[in-house]
Image (spheres, rainbow, N blue to C red):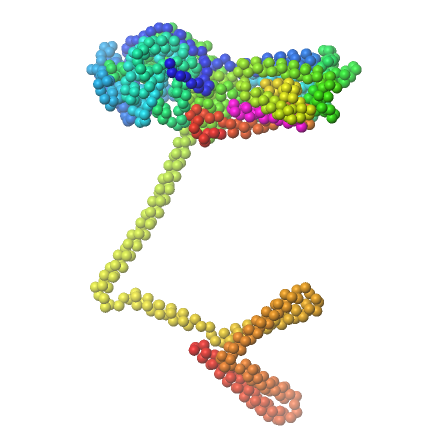
Amino acid sequence: MALLNLSSPHHHSLNRTSRLMMWVLLATVPGLLAQSYWFGYGTVINLIWACALAVTFEALVLWLRKRPIKPFISDGSALVTAFLLALALPPFSPWWLTLVAVLFAIVFAKHLYGGLGNNPFNPAMVGYALCLIAFPVSMTQWAGTENTLNLAQQWQWFWTETLSGGIDGYTQATPLDLMRHTKGLTLGELAATNPVLGLGLSASAWINAAYLVGGLGLLALRIFTWHAPVAMLASLGLCAGLFHMGEPDLYPSASQHLFSGATMLAAFFIVTDPVTSATSRKGKLIFGAGVGLLVFIIRSYGAYPDAFAFAILLMNLAAPLIDTYTQPKAYGHQGNKDNER
Amino acid sequence: MGRVWPFHGGVHPPENKLQSNQSAIVPMPVPKQLVLPLNQHIGAPAKCLIEVGTKVLKGQLIASAQGFVSANLHAPSSGIITAIEERTLPHPSALMDLCIVIDTDGQDQWVDHAGIDPLSVHKGKLLQCIRSAGITGMGGAGFPSAVKLQAKSKINTLIINAAECEPYITADDRLIREYSEQIIAGIQIIRQLLDQPACIIGIEDNKAEAIAILSQALTGIDGIAVAVIPTKYPSGGEKQLIQILTGQQVPHGGIPADLGLVCHNVGTAKAIADAVLLGQPLISRVTTVTGKAAAKAGNYQVLIGTQVSDLMAFAEVDLAATSRLVMGGPMMGFTLTDHQVSVVKSTNCILASSELELAPVADHHACIRCGQCEVVCPAELLPQQLFWFAKAEEFDKAQSHNLADCIECGACAWVCPSQIPLVQYYRFAKGRVKTLHAETQLAEHARLRFETREQRLIDEKLAKEEKRKARAVAAAAAQAAKRAANPDAEDPIAAALARVNQQKQAAATSFTAEPPEDAYKALKTAAAITRTKLKKSSKALTDALASGHEQVESLQTTVDQLTLKADAAKAALSAYETKLGLDPEHEKQLQVTAAKAGAVVRKLEKSLATAEDAAAIEAQIVIAKTAHATANQALETYQHKSTALQQQTQES
C-alpha cells in the first residue's frame, strides 16, 4: 500500500460541522413545539417551506459560484438559517414573506459575502430585519393564543392570505406590543383591564422556557461556550431590573423581559452564531452584553416592539472591533503588557 | 504527591496504549547494517572521526561534538565502516544528509569502558562523562542534555517528564516499569550536578502500574516526589508540564531556567545513569512499535541507526496493510514515505496504522469560527484567527497574535469540526515569517554595508584634507625657520599685505564724509518738503473746517506737528547757512538782477527784428548785454565764494 504523506496531527475527533448544526436544529424542537402549541400550525408550515427554500437557494448559488454542492449542502448551515427564520417570523406569515426573508438571508447575507464562515452579518437576522422594515404589517401579525386556526385554515391563509370571517379574530398584539402602547395606563392597570396580556405573557414565557431548555442542552454538549448567552441575558436582566425598580409602572420587570418576545431564542441560537460574533471568550462576553443592552434600549425607546434583529446586526458590525481589543494573553505573556490587547 | 495545577485547553484523544504496553521491552537483535546520521540532535552536526574501512567496536566514538550545542556519536555495535554518504533522514522533509554506515559483524564486541562512582568525582568530571556519552533529550526534541545540566542560574526544581501524553506511545511507561532503579539513579546524578534541587516526576494517571512501581522504588528517598497528573493531551509538553507542576508559565522568549526550573525526560535520566554508572554511551533506546498493522506491537530496545524497515520486520509489521507510517505519535509525529530511514536518539515510536485506524484524508470545510480550537489551545492562542491570517498571508497580524508561541501540538486540528489542517497552516506561516525575517535581515545588512561605505568615503576625504593642512603647516614652519635663519630679509608676503592694507585705509577715509554741497542740498530739500506738506495739510484743514468734517482735530494736530517740523527744517537750514556765512537772500537778489538783465537783452533782440531804428536799438542791446554780463559775474563770484566757504567748513 502506498504510504500517505500527511502533516500532523494524524488523528481527528469525531467532531463535524454537520454534527454541530444537527444538534442546533434538534435543540430548537422544544421551542418549536411550544410555539406551535400556543399559536397553531403556522410555524410548522413556515418551517417546512423555509427549509425547502433555503436548500434550493443554497444549491442554486453554490452552482452559480461553481462550488461543490453536496459537501456544502450537507453541512446543514442553510437549514439552521431556515429554522431560525421560520421560528422568528410570525405564525401568520404568508408564503411570499418567508420567501423574501430566506432569499435575502441565503443569497445576499450569506453567499454574496463569500458563503459559510465569511458572512459578517447573521443571515437569518438580515432576512428578518429586511422584512420587518419592508412589510411591517405582515411582520407584526401575531396569532392570538386563545383562538388558533386549524390546519386547513392556516394552509389557506398561508397561500392566499384570505380567511372566511377575516383574520382579525385570530390576530392579536404581542405582550411586548401591548406593554409599549399602554394608552396612559400603568402596567398593573393594563394587566387588570386586558386579560389577553396575561395569557399572552404566559404563552411567551412557556415558549421562552422551551428555548431555554434547548439552549442549555447545547451548552451541556459544549456546542458553544456560556459566555455570549449568559452575558446577553445578564445585561438585559440587569437593565430591565434597574429601570423596573425605579419606575415599576412604566418598565416591565426583568423576568418579563427575559421571558417574552424572542429573548431565549436569540440568546441561545442567534447570539451564539460563531461566524458573526466576537472570537475570544472576553469578546463574547462584550458581544453578548452589547446585544442585551441594545435589546433593552430598542424595546423601551425604539420604534419596534422587539428588535433582536437590529441589536444583533449592530453588534455583528462591532464584532471585528471587539476582536481587536480582546485578544487573550497567550501562554508565557502574563507579565507582558504589550500583549494586553 | 505534589500539588497539581490546571493548564488551559487540551484534548482527550483515544489513548490506544494497551496495544503496546502489555508486554516487556524486547531487545532487538543487532541488524546487519546501521546507518547513523551525523545530526540527530538540535545544534551543530557531529564531526566524523573515522574513515571508510575502519573497524569499530561497540561504544567507540565515531563522530565528535562540534561546539557547545552538539553531541558525540558512538558505534552502536562492532563492525566495519562501509560508507560515509548521504542517506534519507528521518525528518518530515525527507532530505538527505551525511550518515555513517556500519556493516555489523555480529560480535557486538564492546570497547573498553567502565563506570564511575558519581559521589567520588567532582561535577566537572561528571558533566564531562555525560557530555562524552552523546546524550540528547529522549523525549523528542533531541536537545543535548549536558547543556541543560550546566545551569547558569540557580535551579530550584528538577522536573522529570514521564507524562507521555501522546496516544499510542508507551516507551516511557515500560521503561519506568522495568528500569525504575536506573531512572532514580539518573535523577540523583542530575540533582548532584544541579546542587540538589527538589525533583518532581510528572506522570499521567493512565499509567497506574508505572506510578505504583515508581512510588515503591522511591520509598525512603528524600527530595523526589511523584506528581500524578490528569491524563490530558498535551500535558507532556515541556511548558504545559511546568504549568501543571508549578503553576508558573515559562515567559515568552524565555527558558525554564529563568524560573529556576529544568526539565528532563525520564528516558534521559536512564541514559545518564547508564553513561555514568556503566560507562555506556547512548547507543540504544526503547522505541514503541504499534498500530493495527503491527502484529507484534510492543516496545523494543533498539540500537541507534537501526533501519525502520528492519525494526518493522522484527515487529512483524504488515507493510501491505500499512496506510500511514508515522514516526512519533499520532498528534505530533511525521509520516515516513521511505522506510529505509534510521531510528535515531529521539525516535520514541513507529506507528504503522492500517487504513481506517487514523483519521482518513478529508476535504476540509469552511471555518465557521466555532471557537472550539480556542477552547483546546494549550498556548491560549486564537487558532481560528491565526488560520485566517495564515490563509490571507497576513503574517504581521499572525505574529501580533503570537504565532511564535504555537507549539504545534495539533489539539486545534484534532477538534476542528471543519477538519482544517490548522497546524499545517501555522507551519506555513512560521516558515514564511522566518523567510521574510531573513530577507529583512539581508536588507538590513545591505543597508549597513552601504552606510559604512559612505562613511568610509567621507572619512577618506577628511583624512586627505587633514594631510593637506598638515603639509601647509609644515611648509609655514619651514618658512619661519628660514626667516629665523636670515632675520634681516624682508618678508615679501608681509610687505604685500601691508601695502594692500594701506590702500584699503586710504579708500575708506575718502568716503567717510558727505560732500558739502550734498549736505546743503539735503537740508534745502528737507525744508522744501516739510513746507509743501504743511501747505497741503493746512489746505485740508481749511476744507475740513469749512465742511465740518469729523477728522478736524486729527488734522489740526498734523498741521501743528508739520508747522513745528517746517520751522525746525528752516531753522536747521538757516543755521547751516549762518554757520557757513552764506546769505541766500543776497544770492537771490543777484540771481534776480542777472535774470532781469537777461530778459532785457532778449526783449531788445526781439524788437530789433521789427524795429526801424536798428542802430539805436543795437546800441541799447550792447548796454543791456554788458549789464547782464556784470550781473552774471557778480552771481558767479558769490557762488564761488560760498562753495569755497562750505568746503572750508567741512574740512575743518
Region of the chain picked out in magenta, as a range: A275-301
Percent of width and height locating residue A138 = 71, 21
Dominant secondary-structure state across the stretch colored magenta: helix
Question: How many tags in the picture?
Answer: 0
Viewer-proximal residue among B170 and B598: B170
Can residue B381 be seen here? The reply is: yes
Viewer-proximal residue among B567 and A244: A244
Percent of width and height locating residue B379 = 44, 22
Asked if the magenta segment contains residue A293, the reply would be yes
Residue displayed at 23% across by 68% down: B488
Asked if the magenta segment contains residue A294, the reply would be yes
Can residue B395 be seen here? The reply is: no
Vertical arrangement, residue B583 with respect to residue A27, above or below: below
Is A210 left, or right, of B425 in this rendering?
right
Residue displayed at 35% across by 24% down: B260
Q: Residue furthest right?
A: A165
The quadrant holding residue B74 is: top left
Percent of width and height locating residue B162 = 36, 15
Is B70 left, or right, of A61 in this rendering?
left
Percent of width and height locating residue B49 = 24, 22
Residue displayed at 53% across by 25% down: A283
Is B369 left, or right, of B105 in this rendering?
right
Q: Which part of the image, by quadrant, shows the N terminus of chain A?
A: top left
Is A164 left, or right, of A102 in this rendering?
right
Viewer-proximal residue among B606 and A225: A225
Vertical arrangement, residue B271 with respect to residue B620, above or below: above
Vertical arrangement, residue B290 with respect to residue B121, above or below: above
The quadrant holding residue B251 is: top left
Residue displayed at 39% across by 18% down: B245
